[in-house]
Image (spheres, rainbow, N blue to C red):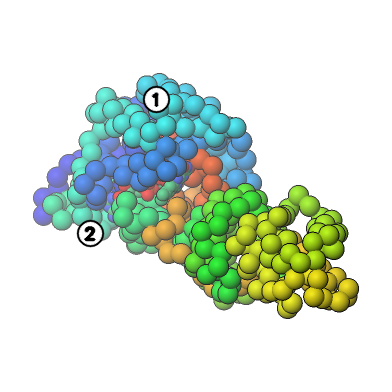
Amino acid sequence: MMTKKKMDVIVIGGGASGMMAAIAAAREGCRVLILEHMDEPGRKILATGNGRCNFTNAAQGCECYRGTTPAFVLPALKKFGWKDVVDFFEELGVWARQREGYYYPRSMQASAIRQGLLSELKRRKVQVECGIGIRNIKKERTGFVIEAKNGDYYGSACILAAGGKASPKSGSDGSGYIYAEKLGHSCIQPLPALVPLLTDAKWNRITAGVRGEARITLYVRGKTAASDSGEVQFTDYGLSGIPVFQVSRYASRALYEGEDVRVQLDLMADVEEEALFQRLISCANAHPFTSWKELLSGMINSKLSEALCGLVKGAGGIPGEMTKEGKRKTALELSRLMKRLTCSVTGTKTFQQAQVTAGGVDTAQIDSSTMGSKLVNGLYFAGEIMDIDGICGGYNLHWAWASGQRAGKSAAEYVKKG
Ligand SMILES: Cc1cc2nc3c(=O)[nH]c(=O)nc-3n(C[C@H](O)[C@H](O)[C@H](O)COP(=O)(O)OP(=O)(O)OC[C@H]3O[C@@H](n4cnc5c(N)ncnc54)[C@H](O)[C@@H]3O)c2cc1C
């Protein structure tokens, strides 16, 4: 098969990180080609932030990133921080707006971000070939041969920016890991993250559809693994919503390792358990002929109240029919459940519903200041393909931009050195 094109840098994957890497390399004067297997680049960007694209965040630090070694992100973040990202897009004509440090395009349309990148690729004469079915990537003495169905491509440097496995309909089907492994790299098991949790709670059926503020704590083998607060969504299969997403990567990993995983919900995080008990018992005394369910509905959502009453013996009736001790025990138990509603986590939703992948190419084999492979000269990585996942709030895209910028610049330097 004939060699089609000889380029300085070939980027595998035209997502957020691949486009950023291509722009960075082209700005250094390189001839750059993006090979994308979907029929257009940047599909996933359009789905981000519910179509509004939360593209970075002003609060940055390695505590916002997870992976085997979260501090791996720091050199890239230092070189390309949130201000650099905002300036980069302003320069491309995309105005930003921010809410409490969360940055969006001013138009609140994710398409503005993708369009800005596409225009810059064009301006920098980056070639983009879509619908490319890559069969293999080989390292030869002077560069990389990318064997595709329509012929071979040759690049002095290669950037793997094929994403992870989350949301495969937007192109990230995990094939990037196969190329990385064939080139000698190892991968940490990729698992769904920022994903809803499946639970075995018998109250799921009752509470499905409820949204409410809660603190969620994830326990692995009885020990706290993660915790977050915000609007939890109760569903017929389990739990969803941002605080659930934030703890989900720890559930994914622990379940994969066969551990016992539980979640505990605090439905009244701003009130002490003793104060809840006192309030409930005084309400029960003041309204002896009002059902426990109705009494509780003055404090929490009525469906939650129904679920909680279903878990406590005697809470199906009215306080007026109970002994003083019975009333006290019921109020105690209901207060406890409002603060510590617990169930087992049986699984997570799949990669189809996940926003990001936890795991990926082992960062121990990558130089954190260049994104260059420590094993293969001229090979670079960008974005979610690596064993780094961000929390919700613009961090995954920030990682795509920062690592993409590093990979593109470093690949260009490598090419220039010859
Ligand atoms: C629904 C949803 C909402 C999200 N919202 C946000 C948000 O608001 N803020 C935020 O920060 N993050 C968000 N994320 C996460 C964020 O979008 C990703 O982390 C980020 O896009 C990763 O960029 P990437 O370039 O590394 O990978 P991807 O965007 O997945 O791009 C990889 C590209 O490589 C291509 N590719 C894969 N394999 C091959 C192959 N073999 N050959 C050629 N091409 C290949 C794919 O088609 C794709 O175009 C969201 C994700 C989802 C799914």
- Tell me the residue at 79%/70% (across/down): 319
- Of 194 and 331, nearer the camera is 331
Nearer the observer: mark 1 or 2; the answer is: 1
Amino acid under disc 2: Arg
**Residue at disc 2, secondary structure:** strand
Q: Which mark is residue 266?
A: none
Q: Residues within 10 Å of mark 2 (few under 14, many from 20)?
A: few
**Residue at disc 1, secondary structure:** loop
Asked if residue 42 can be seen in this view, the reply is: yes
Q: Is residue 128 above or below residue 290?
A: above
In this rendering, position of residue 252 left or right of residue 217: left
The earlier-in-sequence mark between 1 and 2 is: 1
**Farthest left residue?**
1
In this rendering, position of residue 94 left or right of residue 317: left
Asked if residue 341 can be seen in this view, the reply is: no
Q: Position of residue 61 (x, y in %)?
A: 62, 40
Q: Position of residue 138 (x, y in %)?
A: 28, 56
- Of 332 and 191, nearer the camera is 332
- Tell me the residue at 45%/42% (across/down): 49
- Tell me the residue at 60%/37% (across/down): 60
Question: In which quadrant will I find the N terminus?
Answer: bottom left
Q: Position of residue 410 (x, y in %)?
A: 42, 37
- Of 199 and 134, nearer the camera is 199
Amino acid under disc 1: Val
Q: Is residue 9 above or below residue 276?
A: above
Q: Which mark is residue 135?
A: 2
Q: Is residue 273 above or below residue 402?
A: below
- Tell me the residue at 27%/36% (across/down): 32
Q: Which residue is mark 1?
A: 94
Q: Position of residue 347 (x, y in %)?
A: 51, 70
Location of residue 297 (image quadrant): bottom right
Alpha carbon of mark 1 to alpha carbon of mark 2: how far?
36 Å
